[in-house]
Structures are given as C-alpha cells and as structure tokens.
Image (tube, helix red, strand yellow):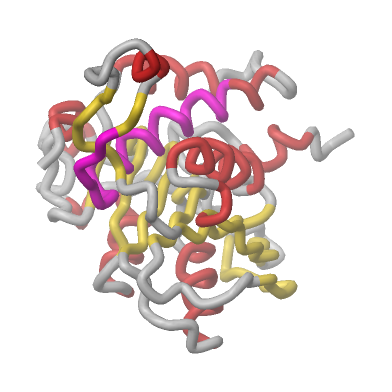
Amino acid sequence: MSDSRSLEIEHRYGPRVHLLSDPWMLATLARIGSPDVHAPEVIGLVRSAYRILLHHAAASEFPRTERAVDTRMKQHTEHGVWRGVTVDPQLDVAVANVLRAGNLPSVLCLEELGRVVGPGRVRIDHFYLGRVADEAGHVVGVESAGSKIGGPISDRIVLIPDPMGATGSTILEALAAYRARDLGRPAKVIALHLMITPEYLRRVLDATDDVIVYAGRLDRGLSPDEVLAKPPGEDWERERGLTENGYIVPGAGGLGEVLTNAWC
C-alpha cells in the first residue's frame, strides 16, 4: 500500500472508494466552485487539481518496477546510475474522454502519463454523452451521440477523468460502450473525479464490480445534520448530495459550462 493513502479520509463505502483529504486539493476545489471564478482561470485550476488526483491514484494503483537509470553523471563516474522503484514505464493506458467536462482532464492525463510511461502507450477514447432532462428539468438519463475508441482495452488501465461524479450515468454509459464492442477486460478501471455524491457511489458500485473511484471531495450537503456528523457512508441511505435536477451540492455548478463559457 502506498503512503499516499495517508491523504485519504476514512469512510464506510468500501475498499473501491478513495476520498482525498489533501488540503491543497481542497483549497483548489474551493476556488473552482467559487462564483467569482470563470474561464480561463478555472481551466488552470482544474488542470492543477487533476495533476494531484492523477498522481495520487497512480501512486496507489499503477504497477511498479525496479529500475536502473543512467544520469548525466554517468560520463564522470560509474556510480552515476539511479536505482529505485517507479511506476512501470511499460504500462498501457486508455483515457476515456467523456465530453464536455472530461475533455480538459483527459488531455492533461495524456500529457502527464506521456512524460512517465511514454506517449506511445497512452491513448484517448472519446465518448459524446449528454444529460437528458424532462420538462421539469429533472435528469432522466444520458444520451449518446456516438464514440470513437482506438482499440482493445485488454490488460490496459482505463482512466475515466470526469470532473463531477453526480449520478454515475455518464461513467456507466462509457463502460457500456466499451463492453458493446467486446474489446476485452481491462487491467483496472479507475474513475477520477473532483467531486462526487453518495448517490453516485451507490449507483456505480452497485452496477459494477471493478470500478475504483478516486475523488478530491465528497459532497453530501443536502444530508441531515445528524448524518453529516457521522463518518461518510455510515448512514448511506440518508446521505444526499444531489438536487432534484441532478446538480451536486455544495458542488461547483455546471462545470462543463463554466469551463467552456457555454452561455457566450
């Protein structure tokens, strides 16, 4: 187990859920959700938050290997060789880009991973998904406009960096698109979220047996005070973090819209 787990809060949701308690991350998320923050500032903040989240998940979940790497000092001394344990550079990763909010963190994951495991081993798959709401504005499902998948996911780590884990619909739809193409079983599926709700966790954990969730923050702001006084997950049935129309509370509003200035 990685020491990075010391920066996680205790909860009762089970071993597939990892909730960060990193003060720097929490400060960044507080700024992201602030009503006086707009694009382009919010773009930089989301990138910063996802670096923290990706590095934390990688330290905990990615395979490792012992390595001996020549440094620039090798030309001066035979001892100029660094030896130690790192993330395995032979790792293969597929990043599932759930448009629209997932586009920015997906590109960041490609950049960050490409510096460590090599750009030839990391790809982005695209999923064109959007919420479907009824006349009252309540989210009733997810509509797919198609996907573009680069190839098999057998033995790959699949990362799903979708900032807001609200209902779980988009994550499950992306996984269904992989399964429908019979692309093999991944080594791991890791969902990376800035903020999630108890409702999201219940739906995703109930519907899957392999998804591992990493989140910068758990939002359950609509729960009764006596529930909030308990450890997360202890009174799961009474925990609430979603409004009737599917937005996270406290949350950050419609982050996909904020990132793209959708109202311009």
Q: Is residue 124 above or below residue 262?
A: below
User: In this rendering, does residue 258 appear at all?
Assistant: yes
- In the rendered structure, the answer to whether residue 17 lies left or right of residue 107 reads left
Q: Is residue 67 magenta?
A: yes
Across and down, in percent, residue 68 comes to 26, 35
Q: Is residue 11 magenta?
A: no
Q: Quadrant of the C terminus?
A: top right
Task: Identify the main secondary structure in magenta.
Answer: helix
Magenta range: 45-68
Residue at 38 percent across and 55 percent down: it is: 91
Q: Quadrant of the N terminus?
A: top left
Residue at 42 percent across and 39 percent down: it is: 195
Across and down, in percent, residue 231 comes to 11, 37
Out of 231 and 217, give the one closest to the viewer: 217
- In the rendered structure, the answer to whether residue 134 lies left or right of residue 79 reads right
Residue 57: quadrant of the picture: top left
Out of 187 and 15, give the one closest to the viewer: 187
User: In this rendering, does residue 133 appear at all?
Assistant: no
Residue 216: quadrant of the picture: top left
Residue at 62 percent across and 19 percent down: it is: 35
How many labels sit on residues?
0
Out of 92 and 149, give the one closest to the viewer: 92
Across and down, in percent, residue 30 comes to 46, 19
- In the rendered structure, the answer to whether residue 187 lies left or right of residue 176 reads left
Across and down, in percent, residue 108 comes to 58, 38
Out of 71 and 144, give the one closest to the viewer: 71
Q: Is residue 67 above or below residue 172?
A: above
Residue lying at the far right in this picture: please name it: 264
Residue at 64 percent across and 40 percent down: it is: 104
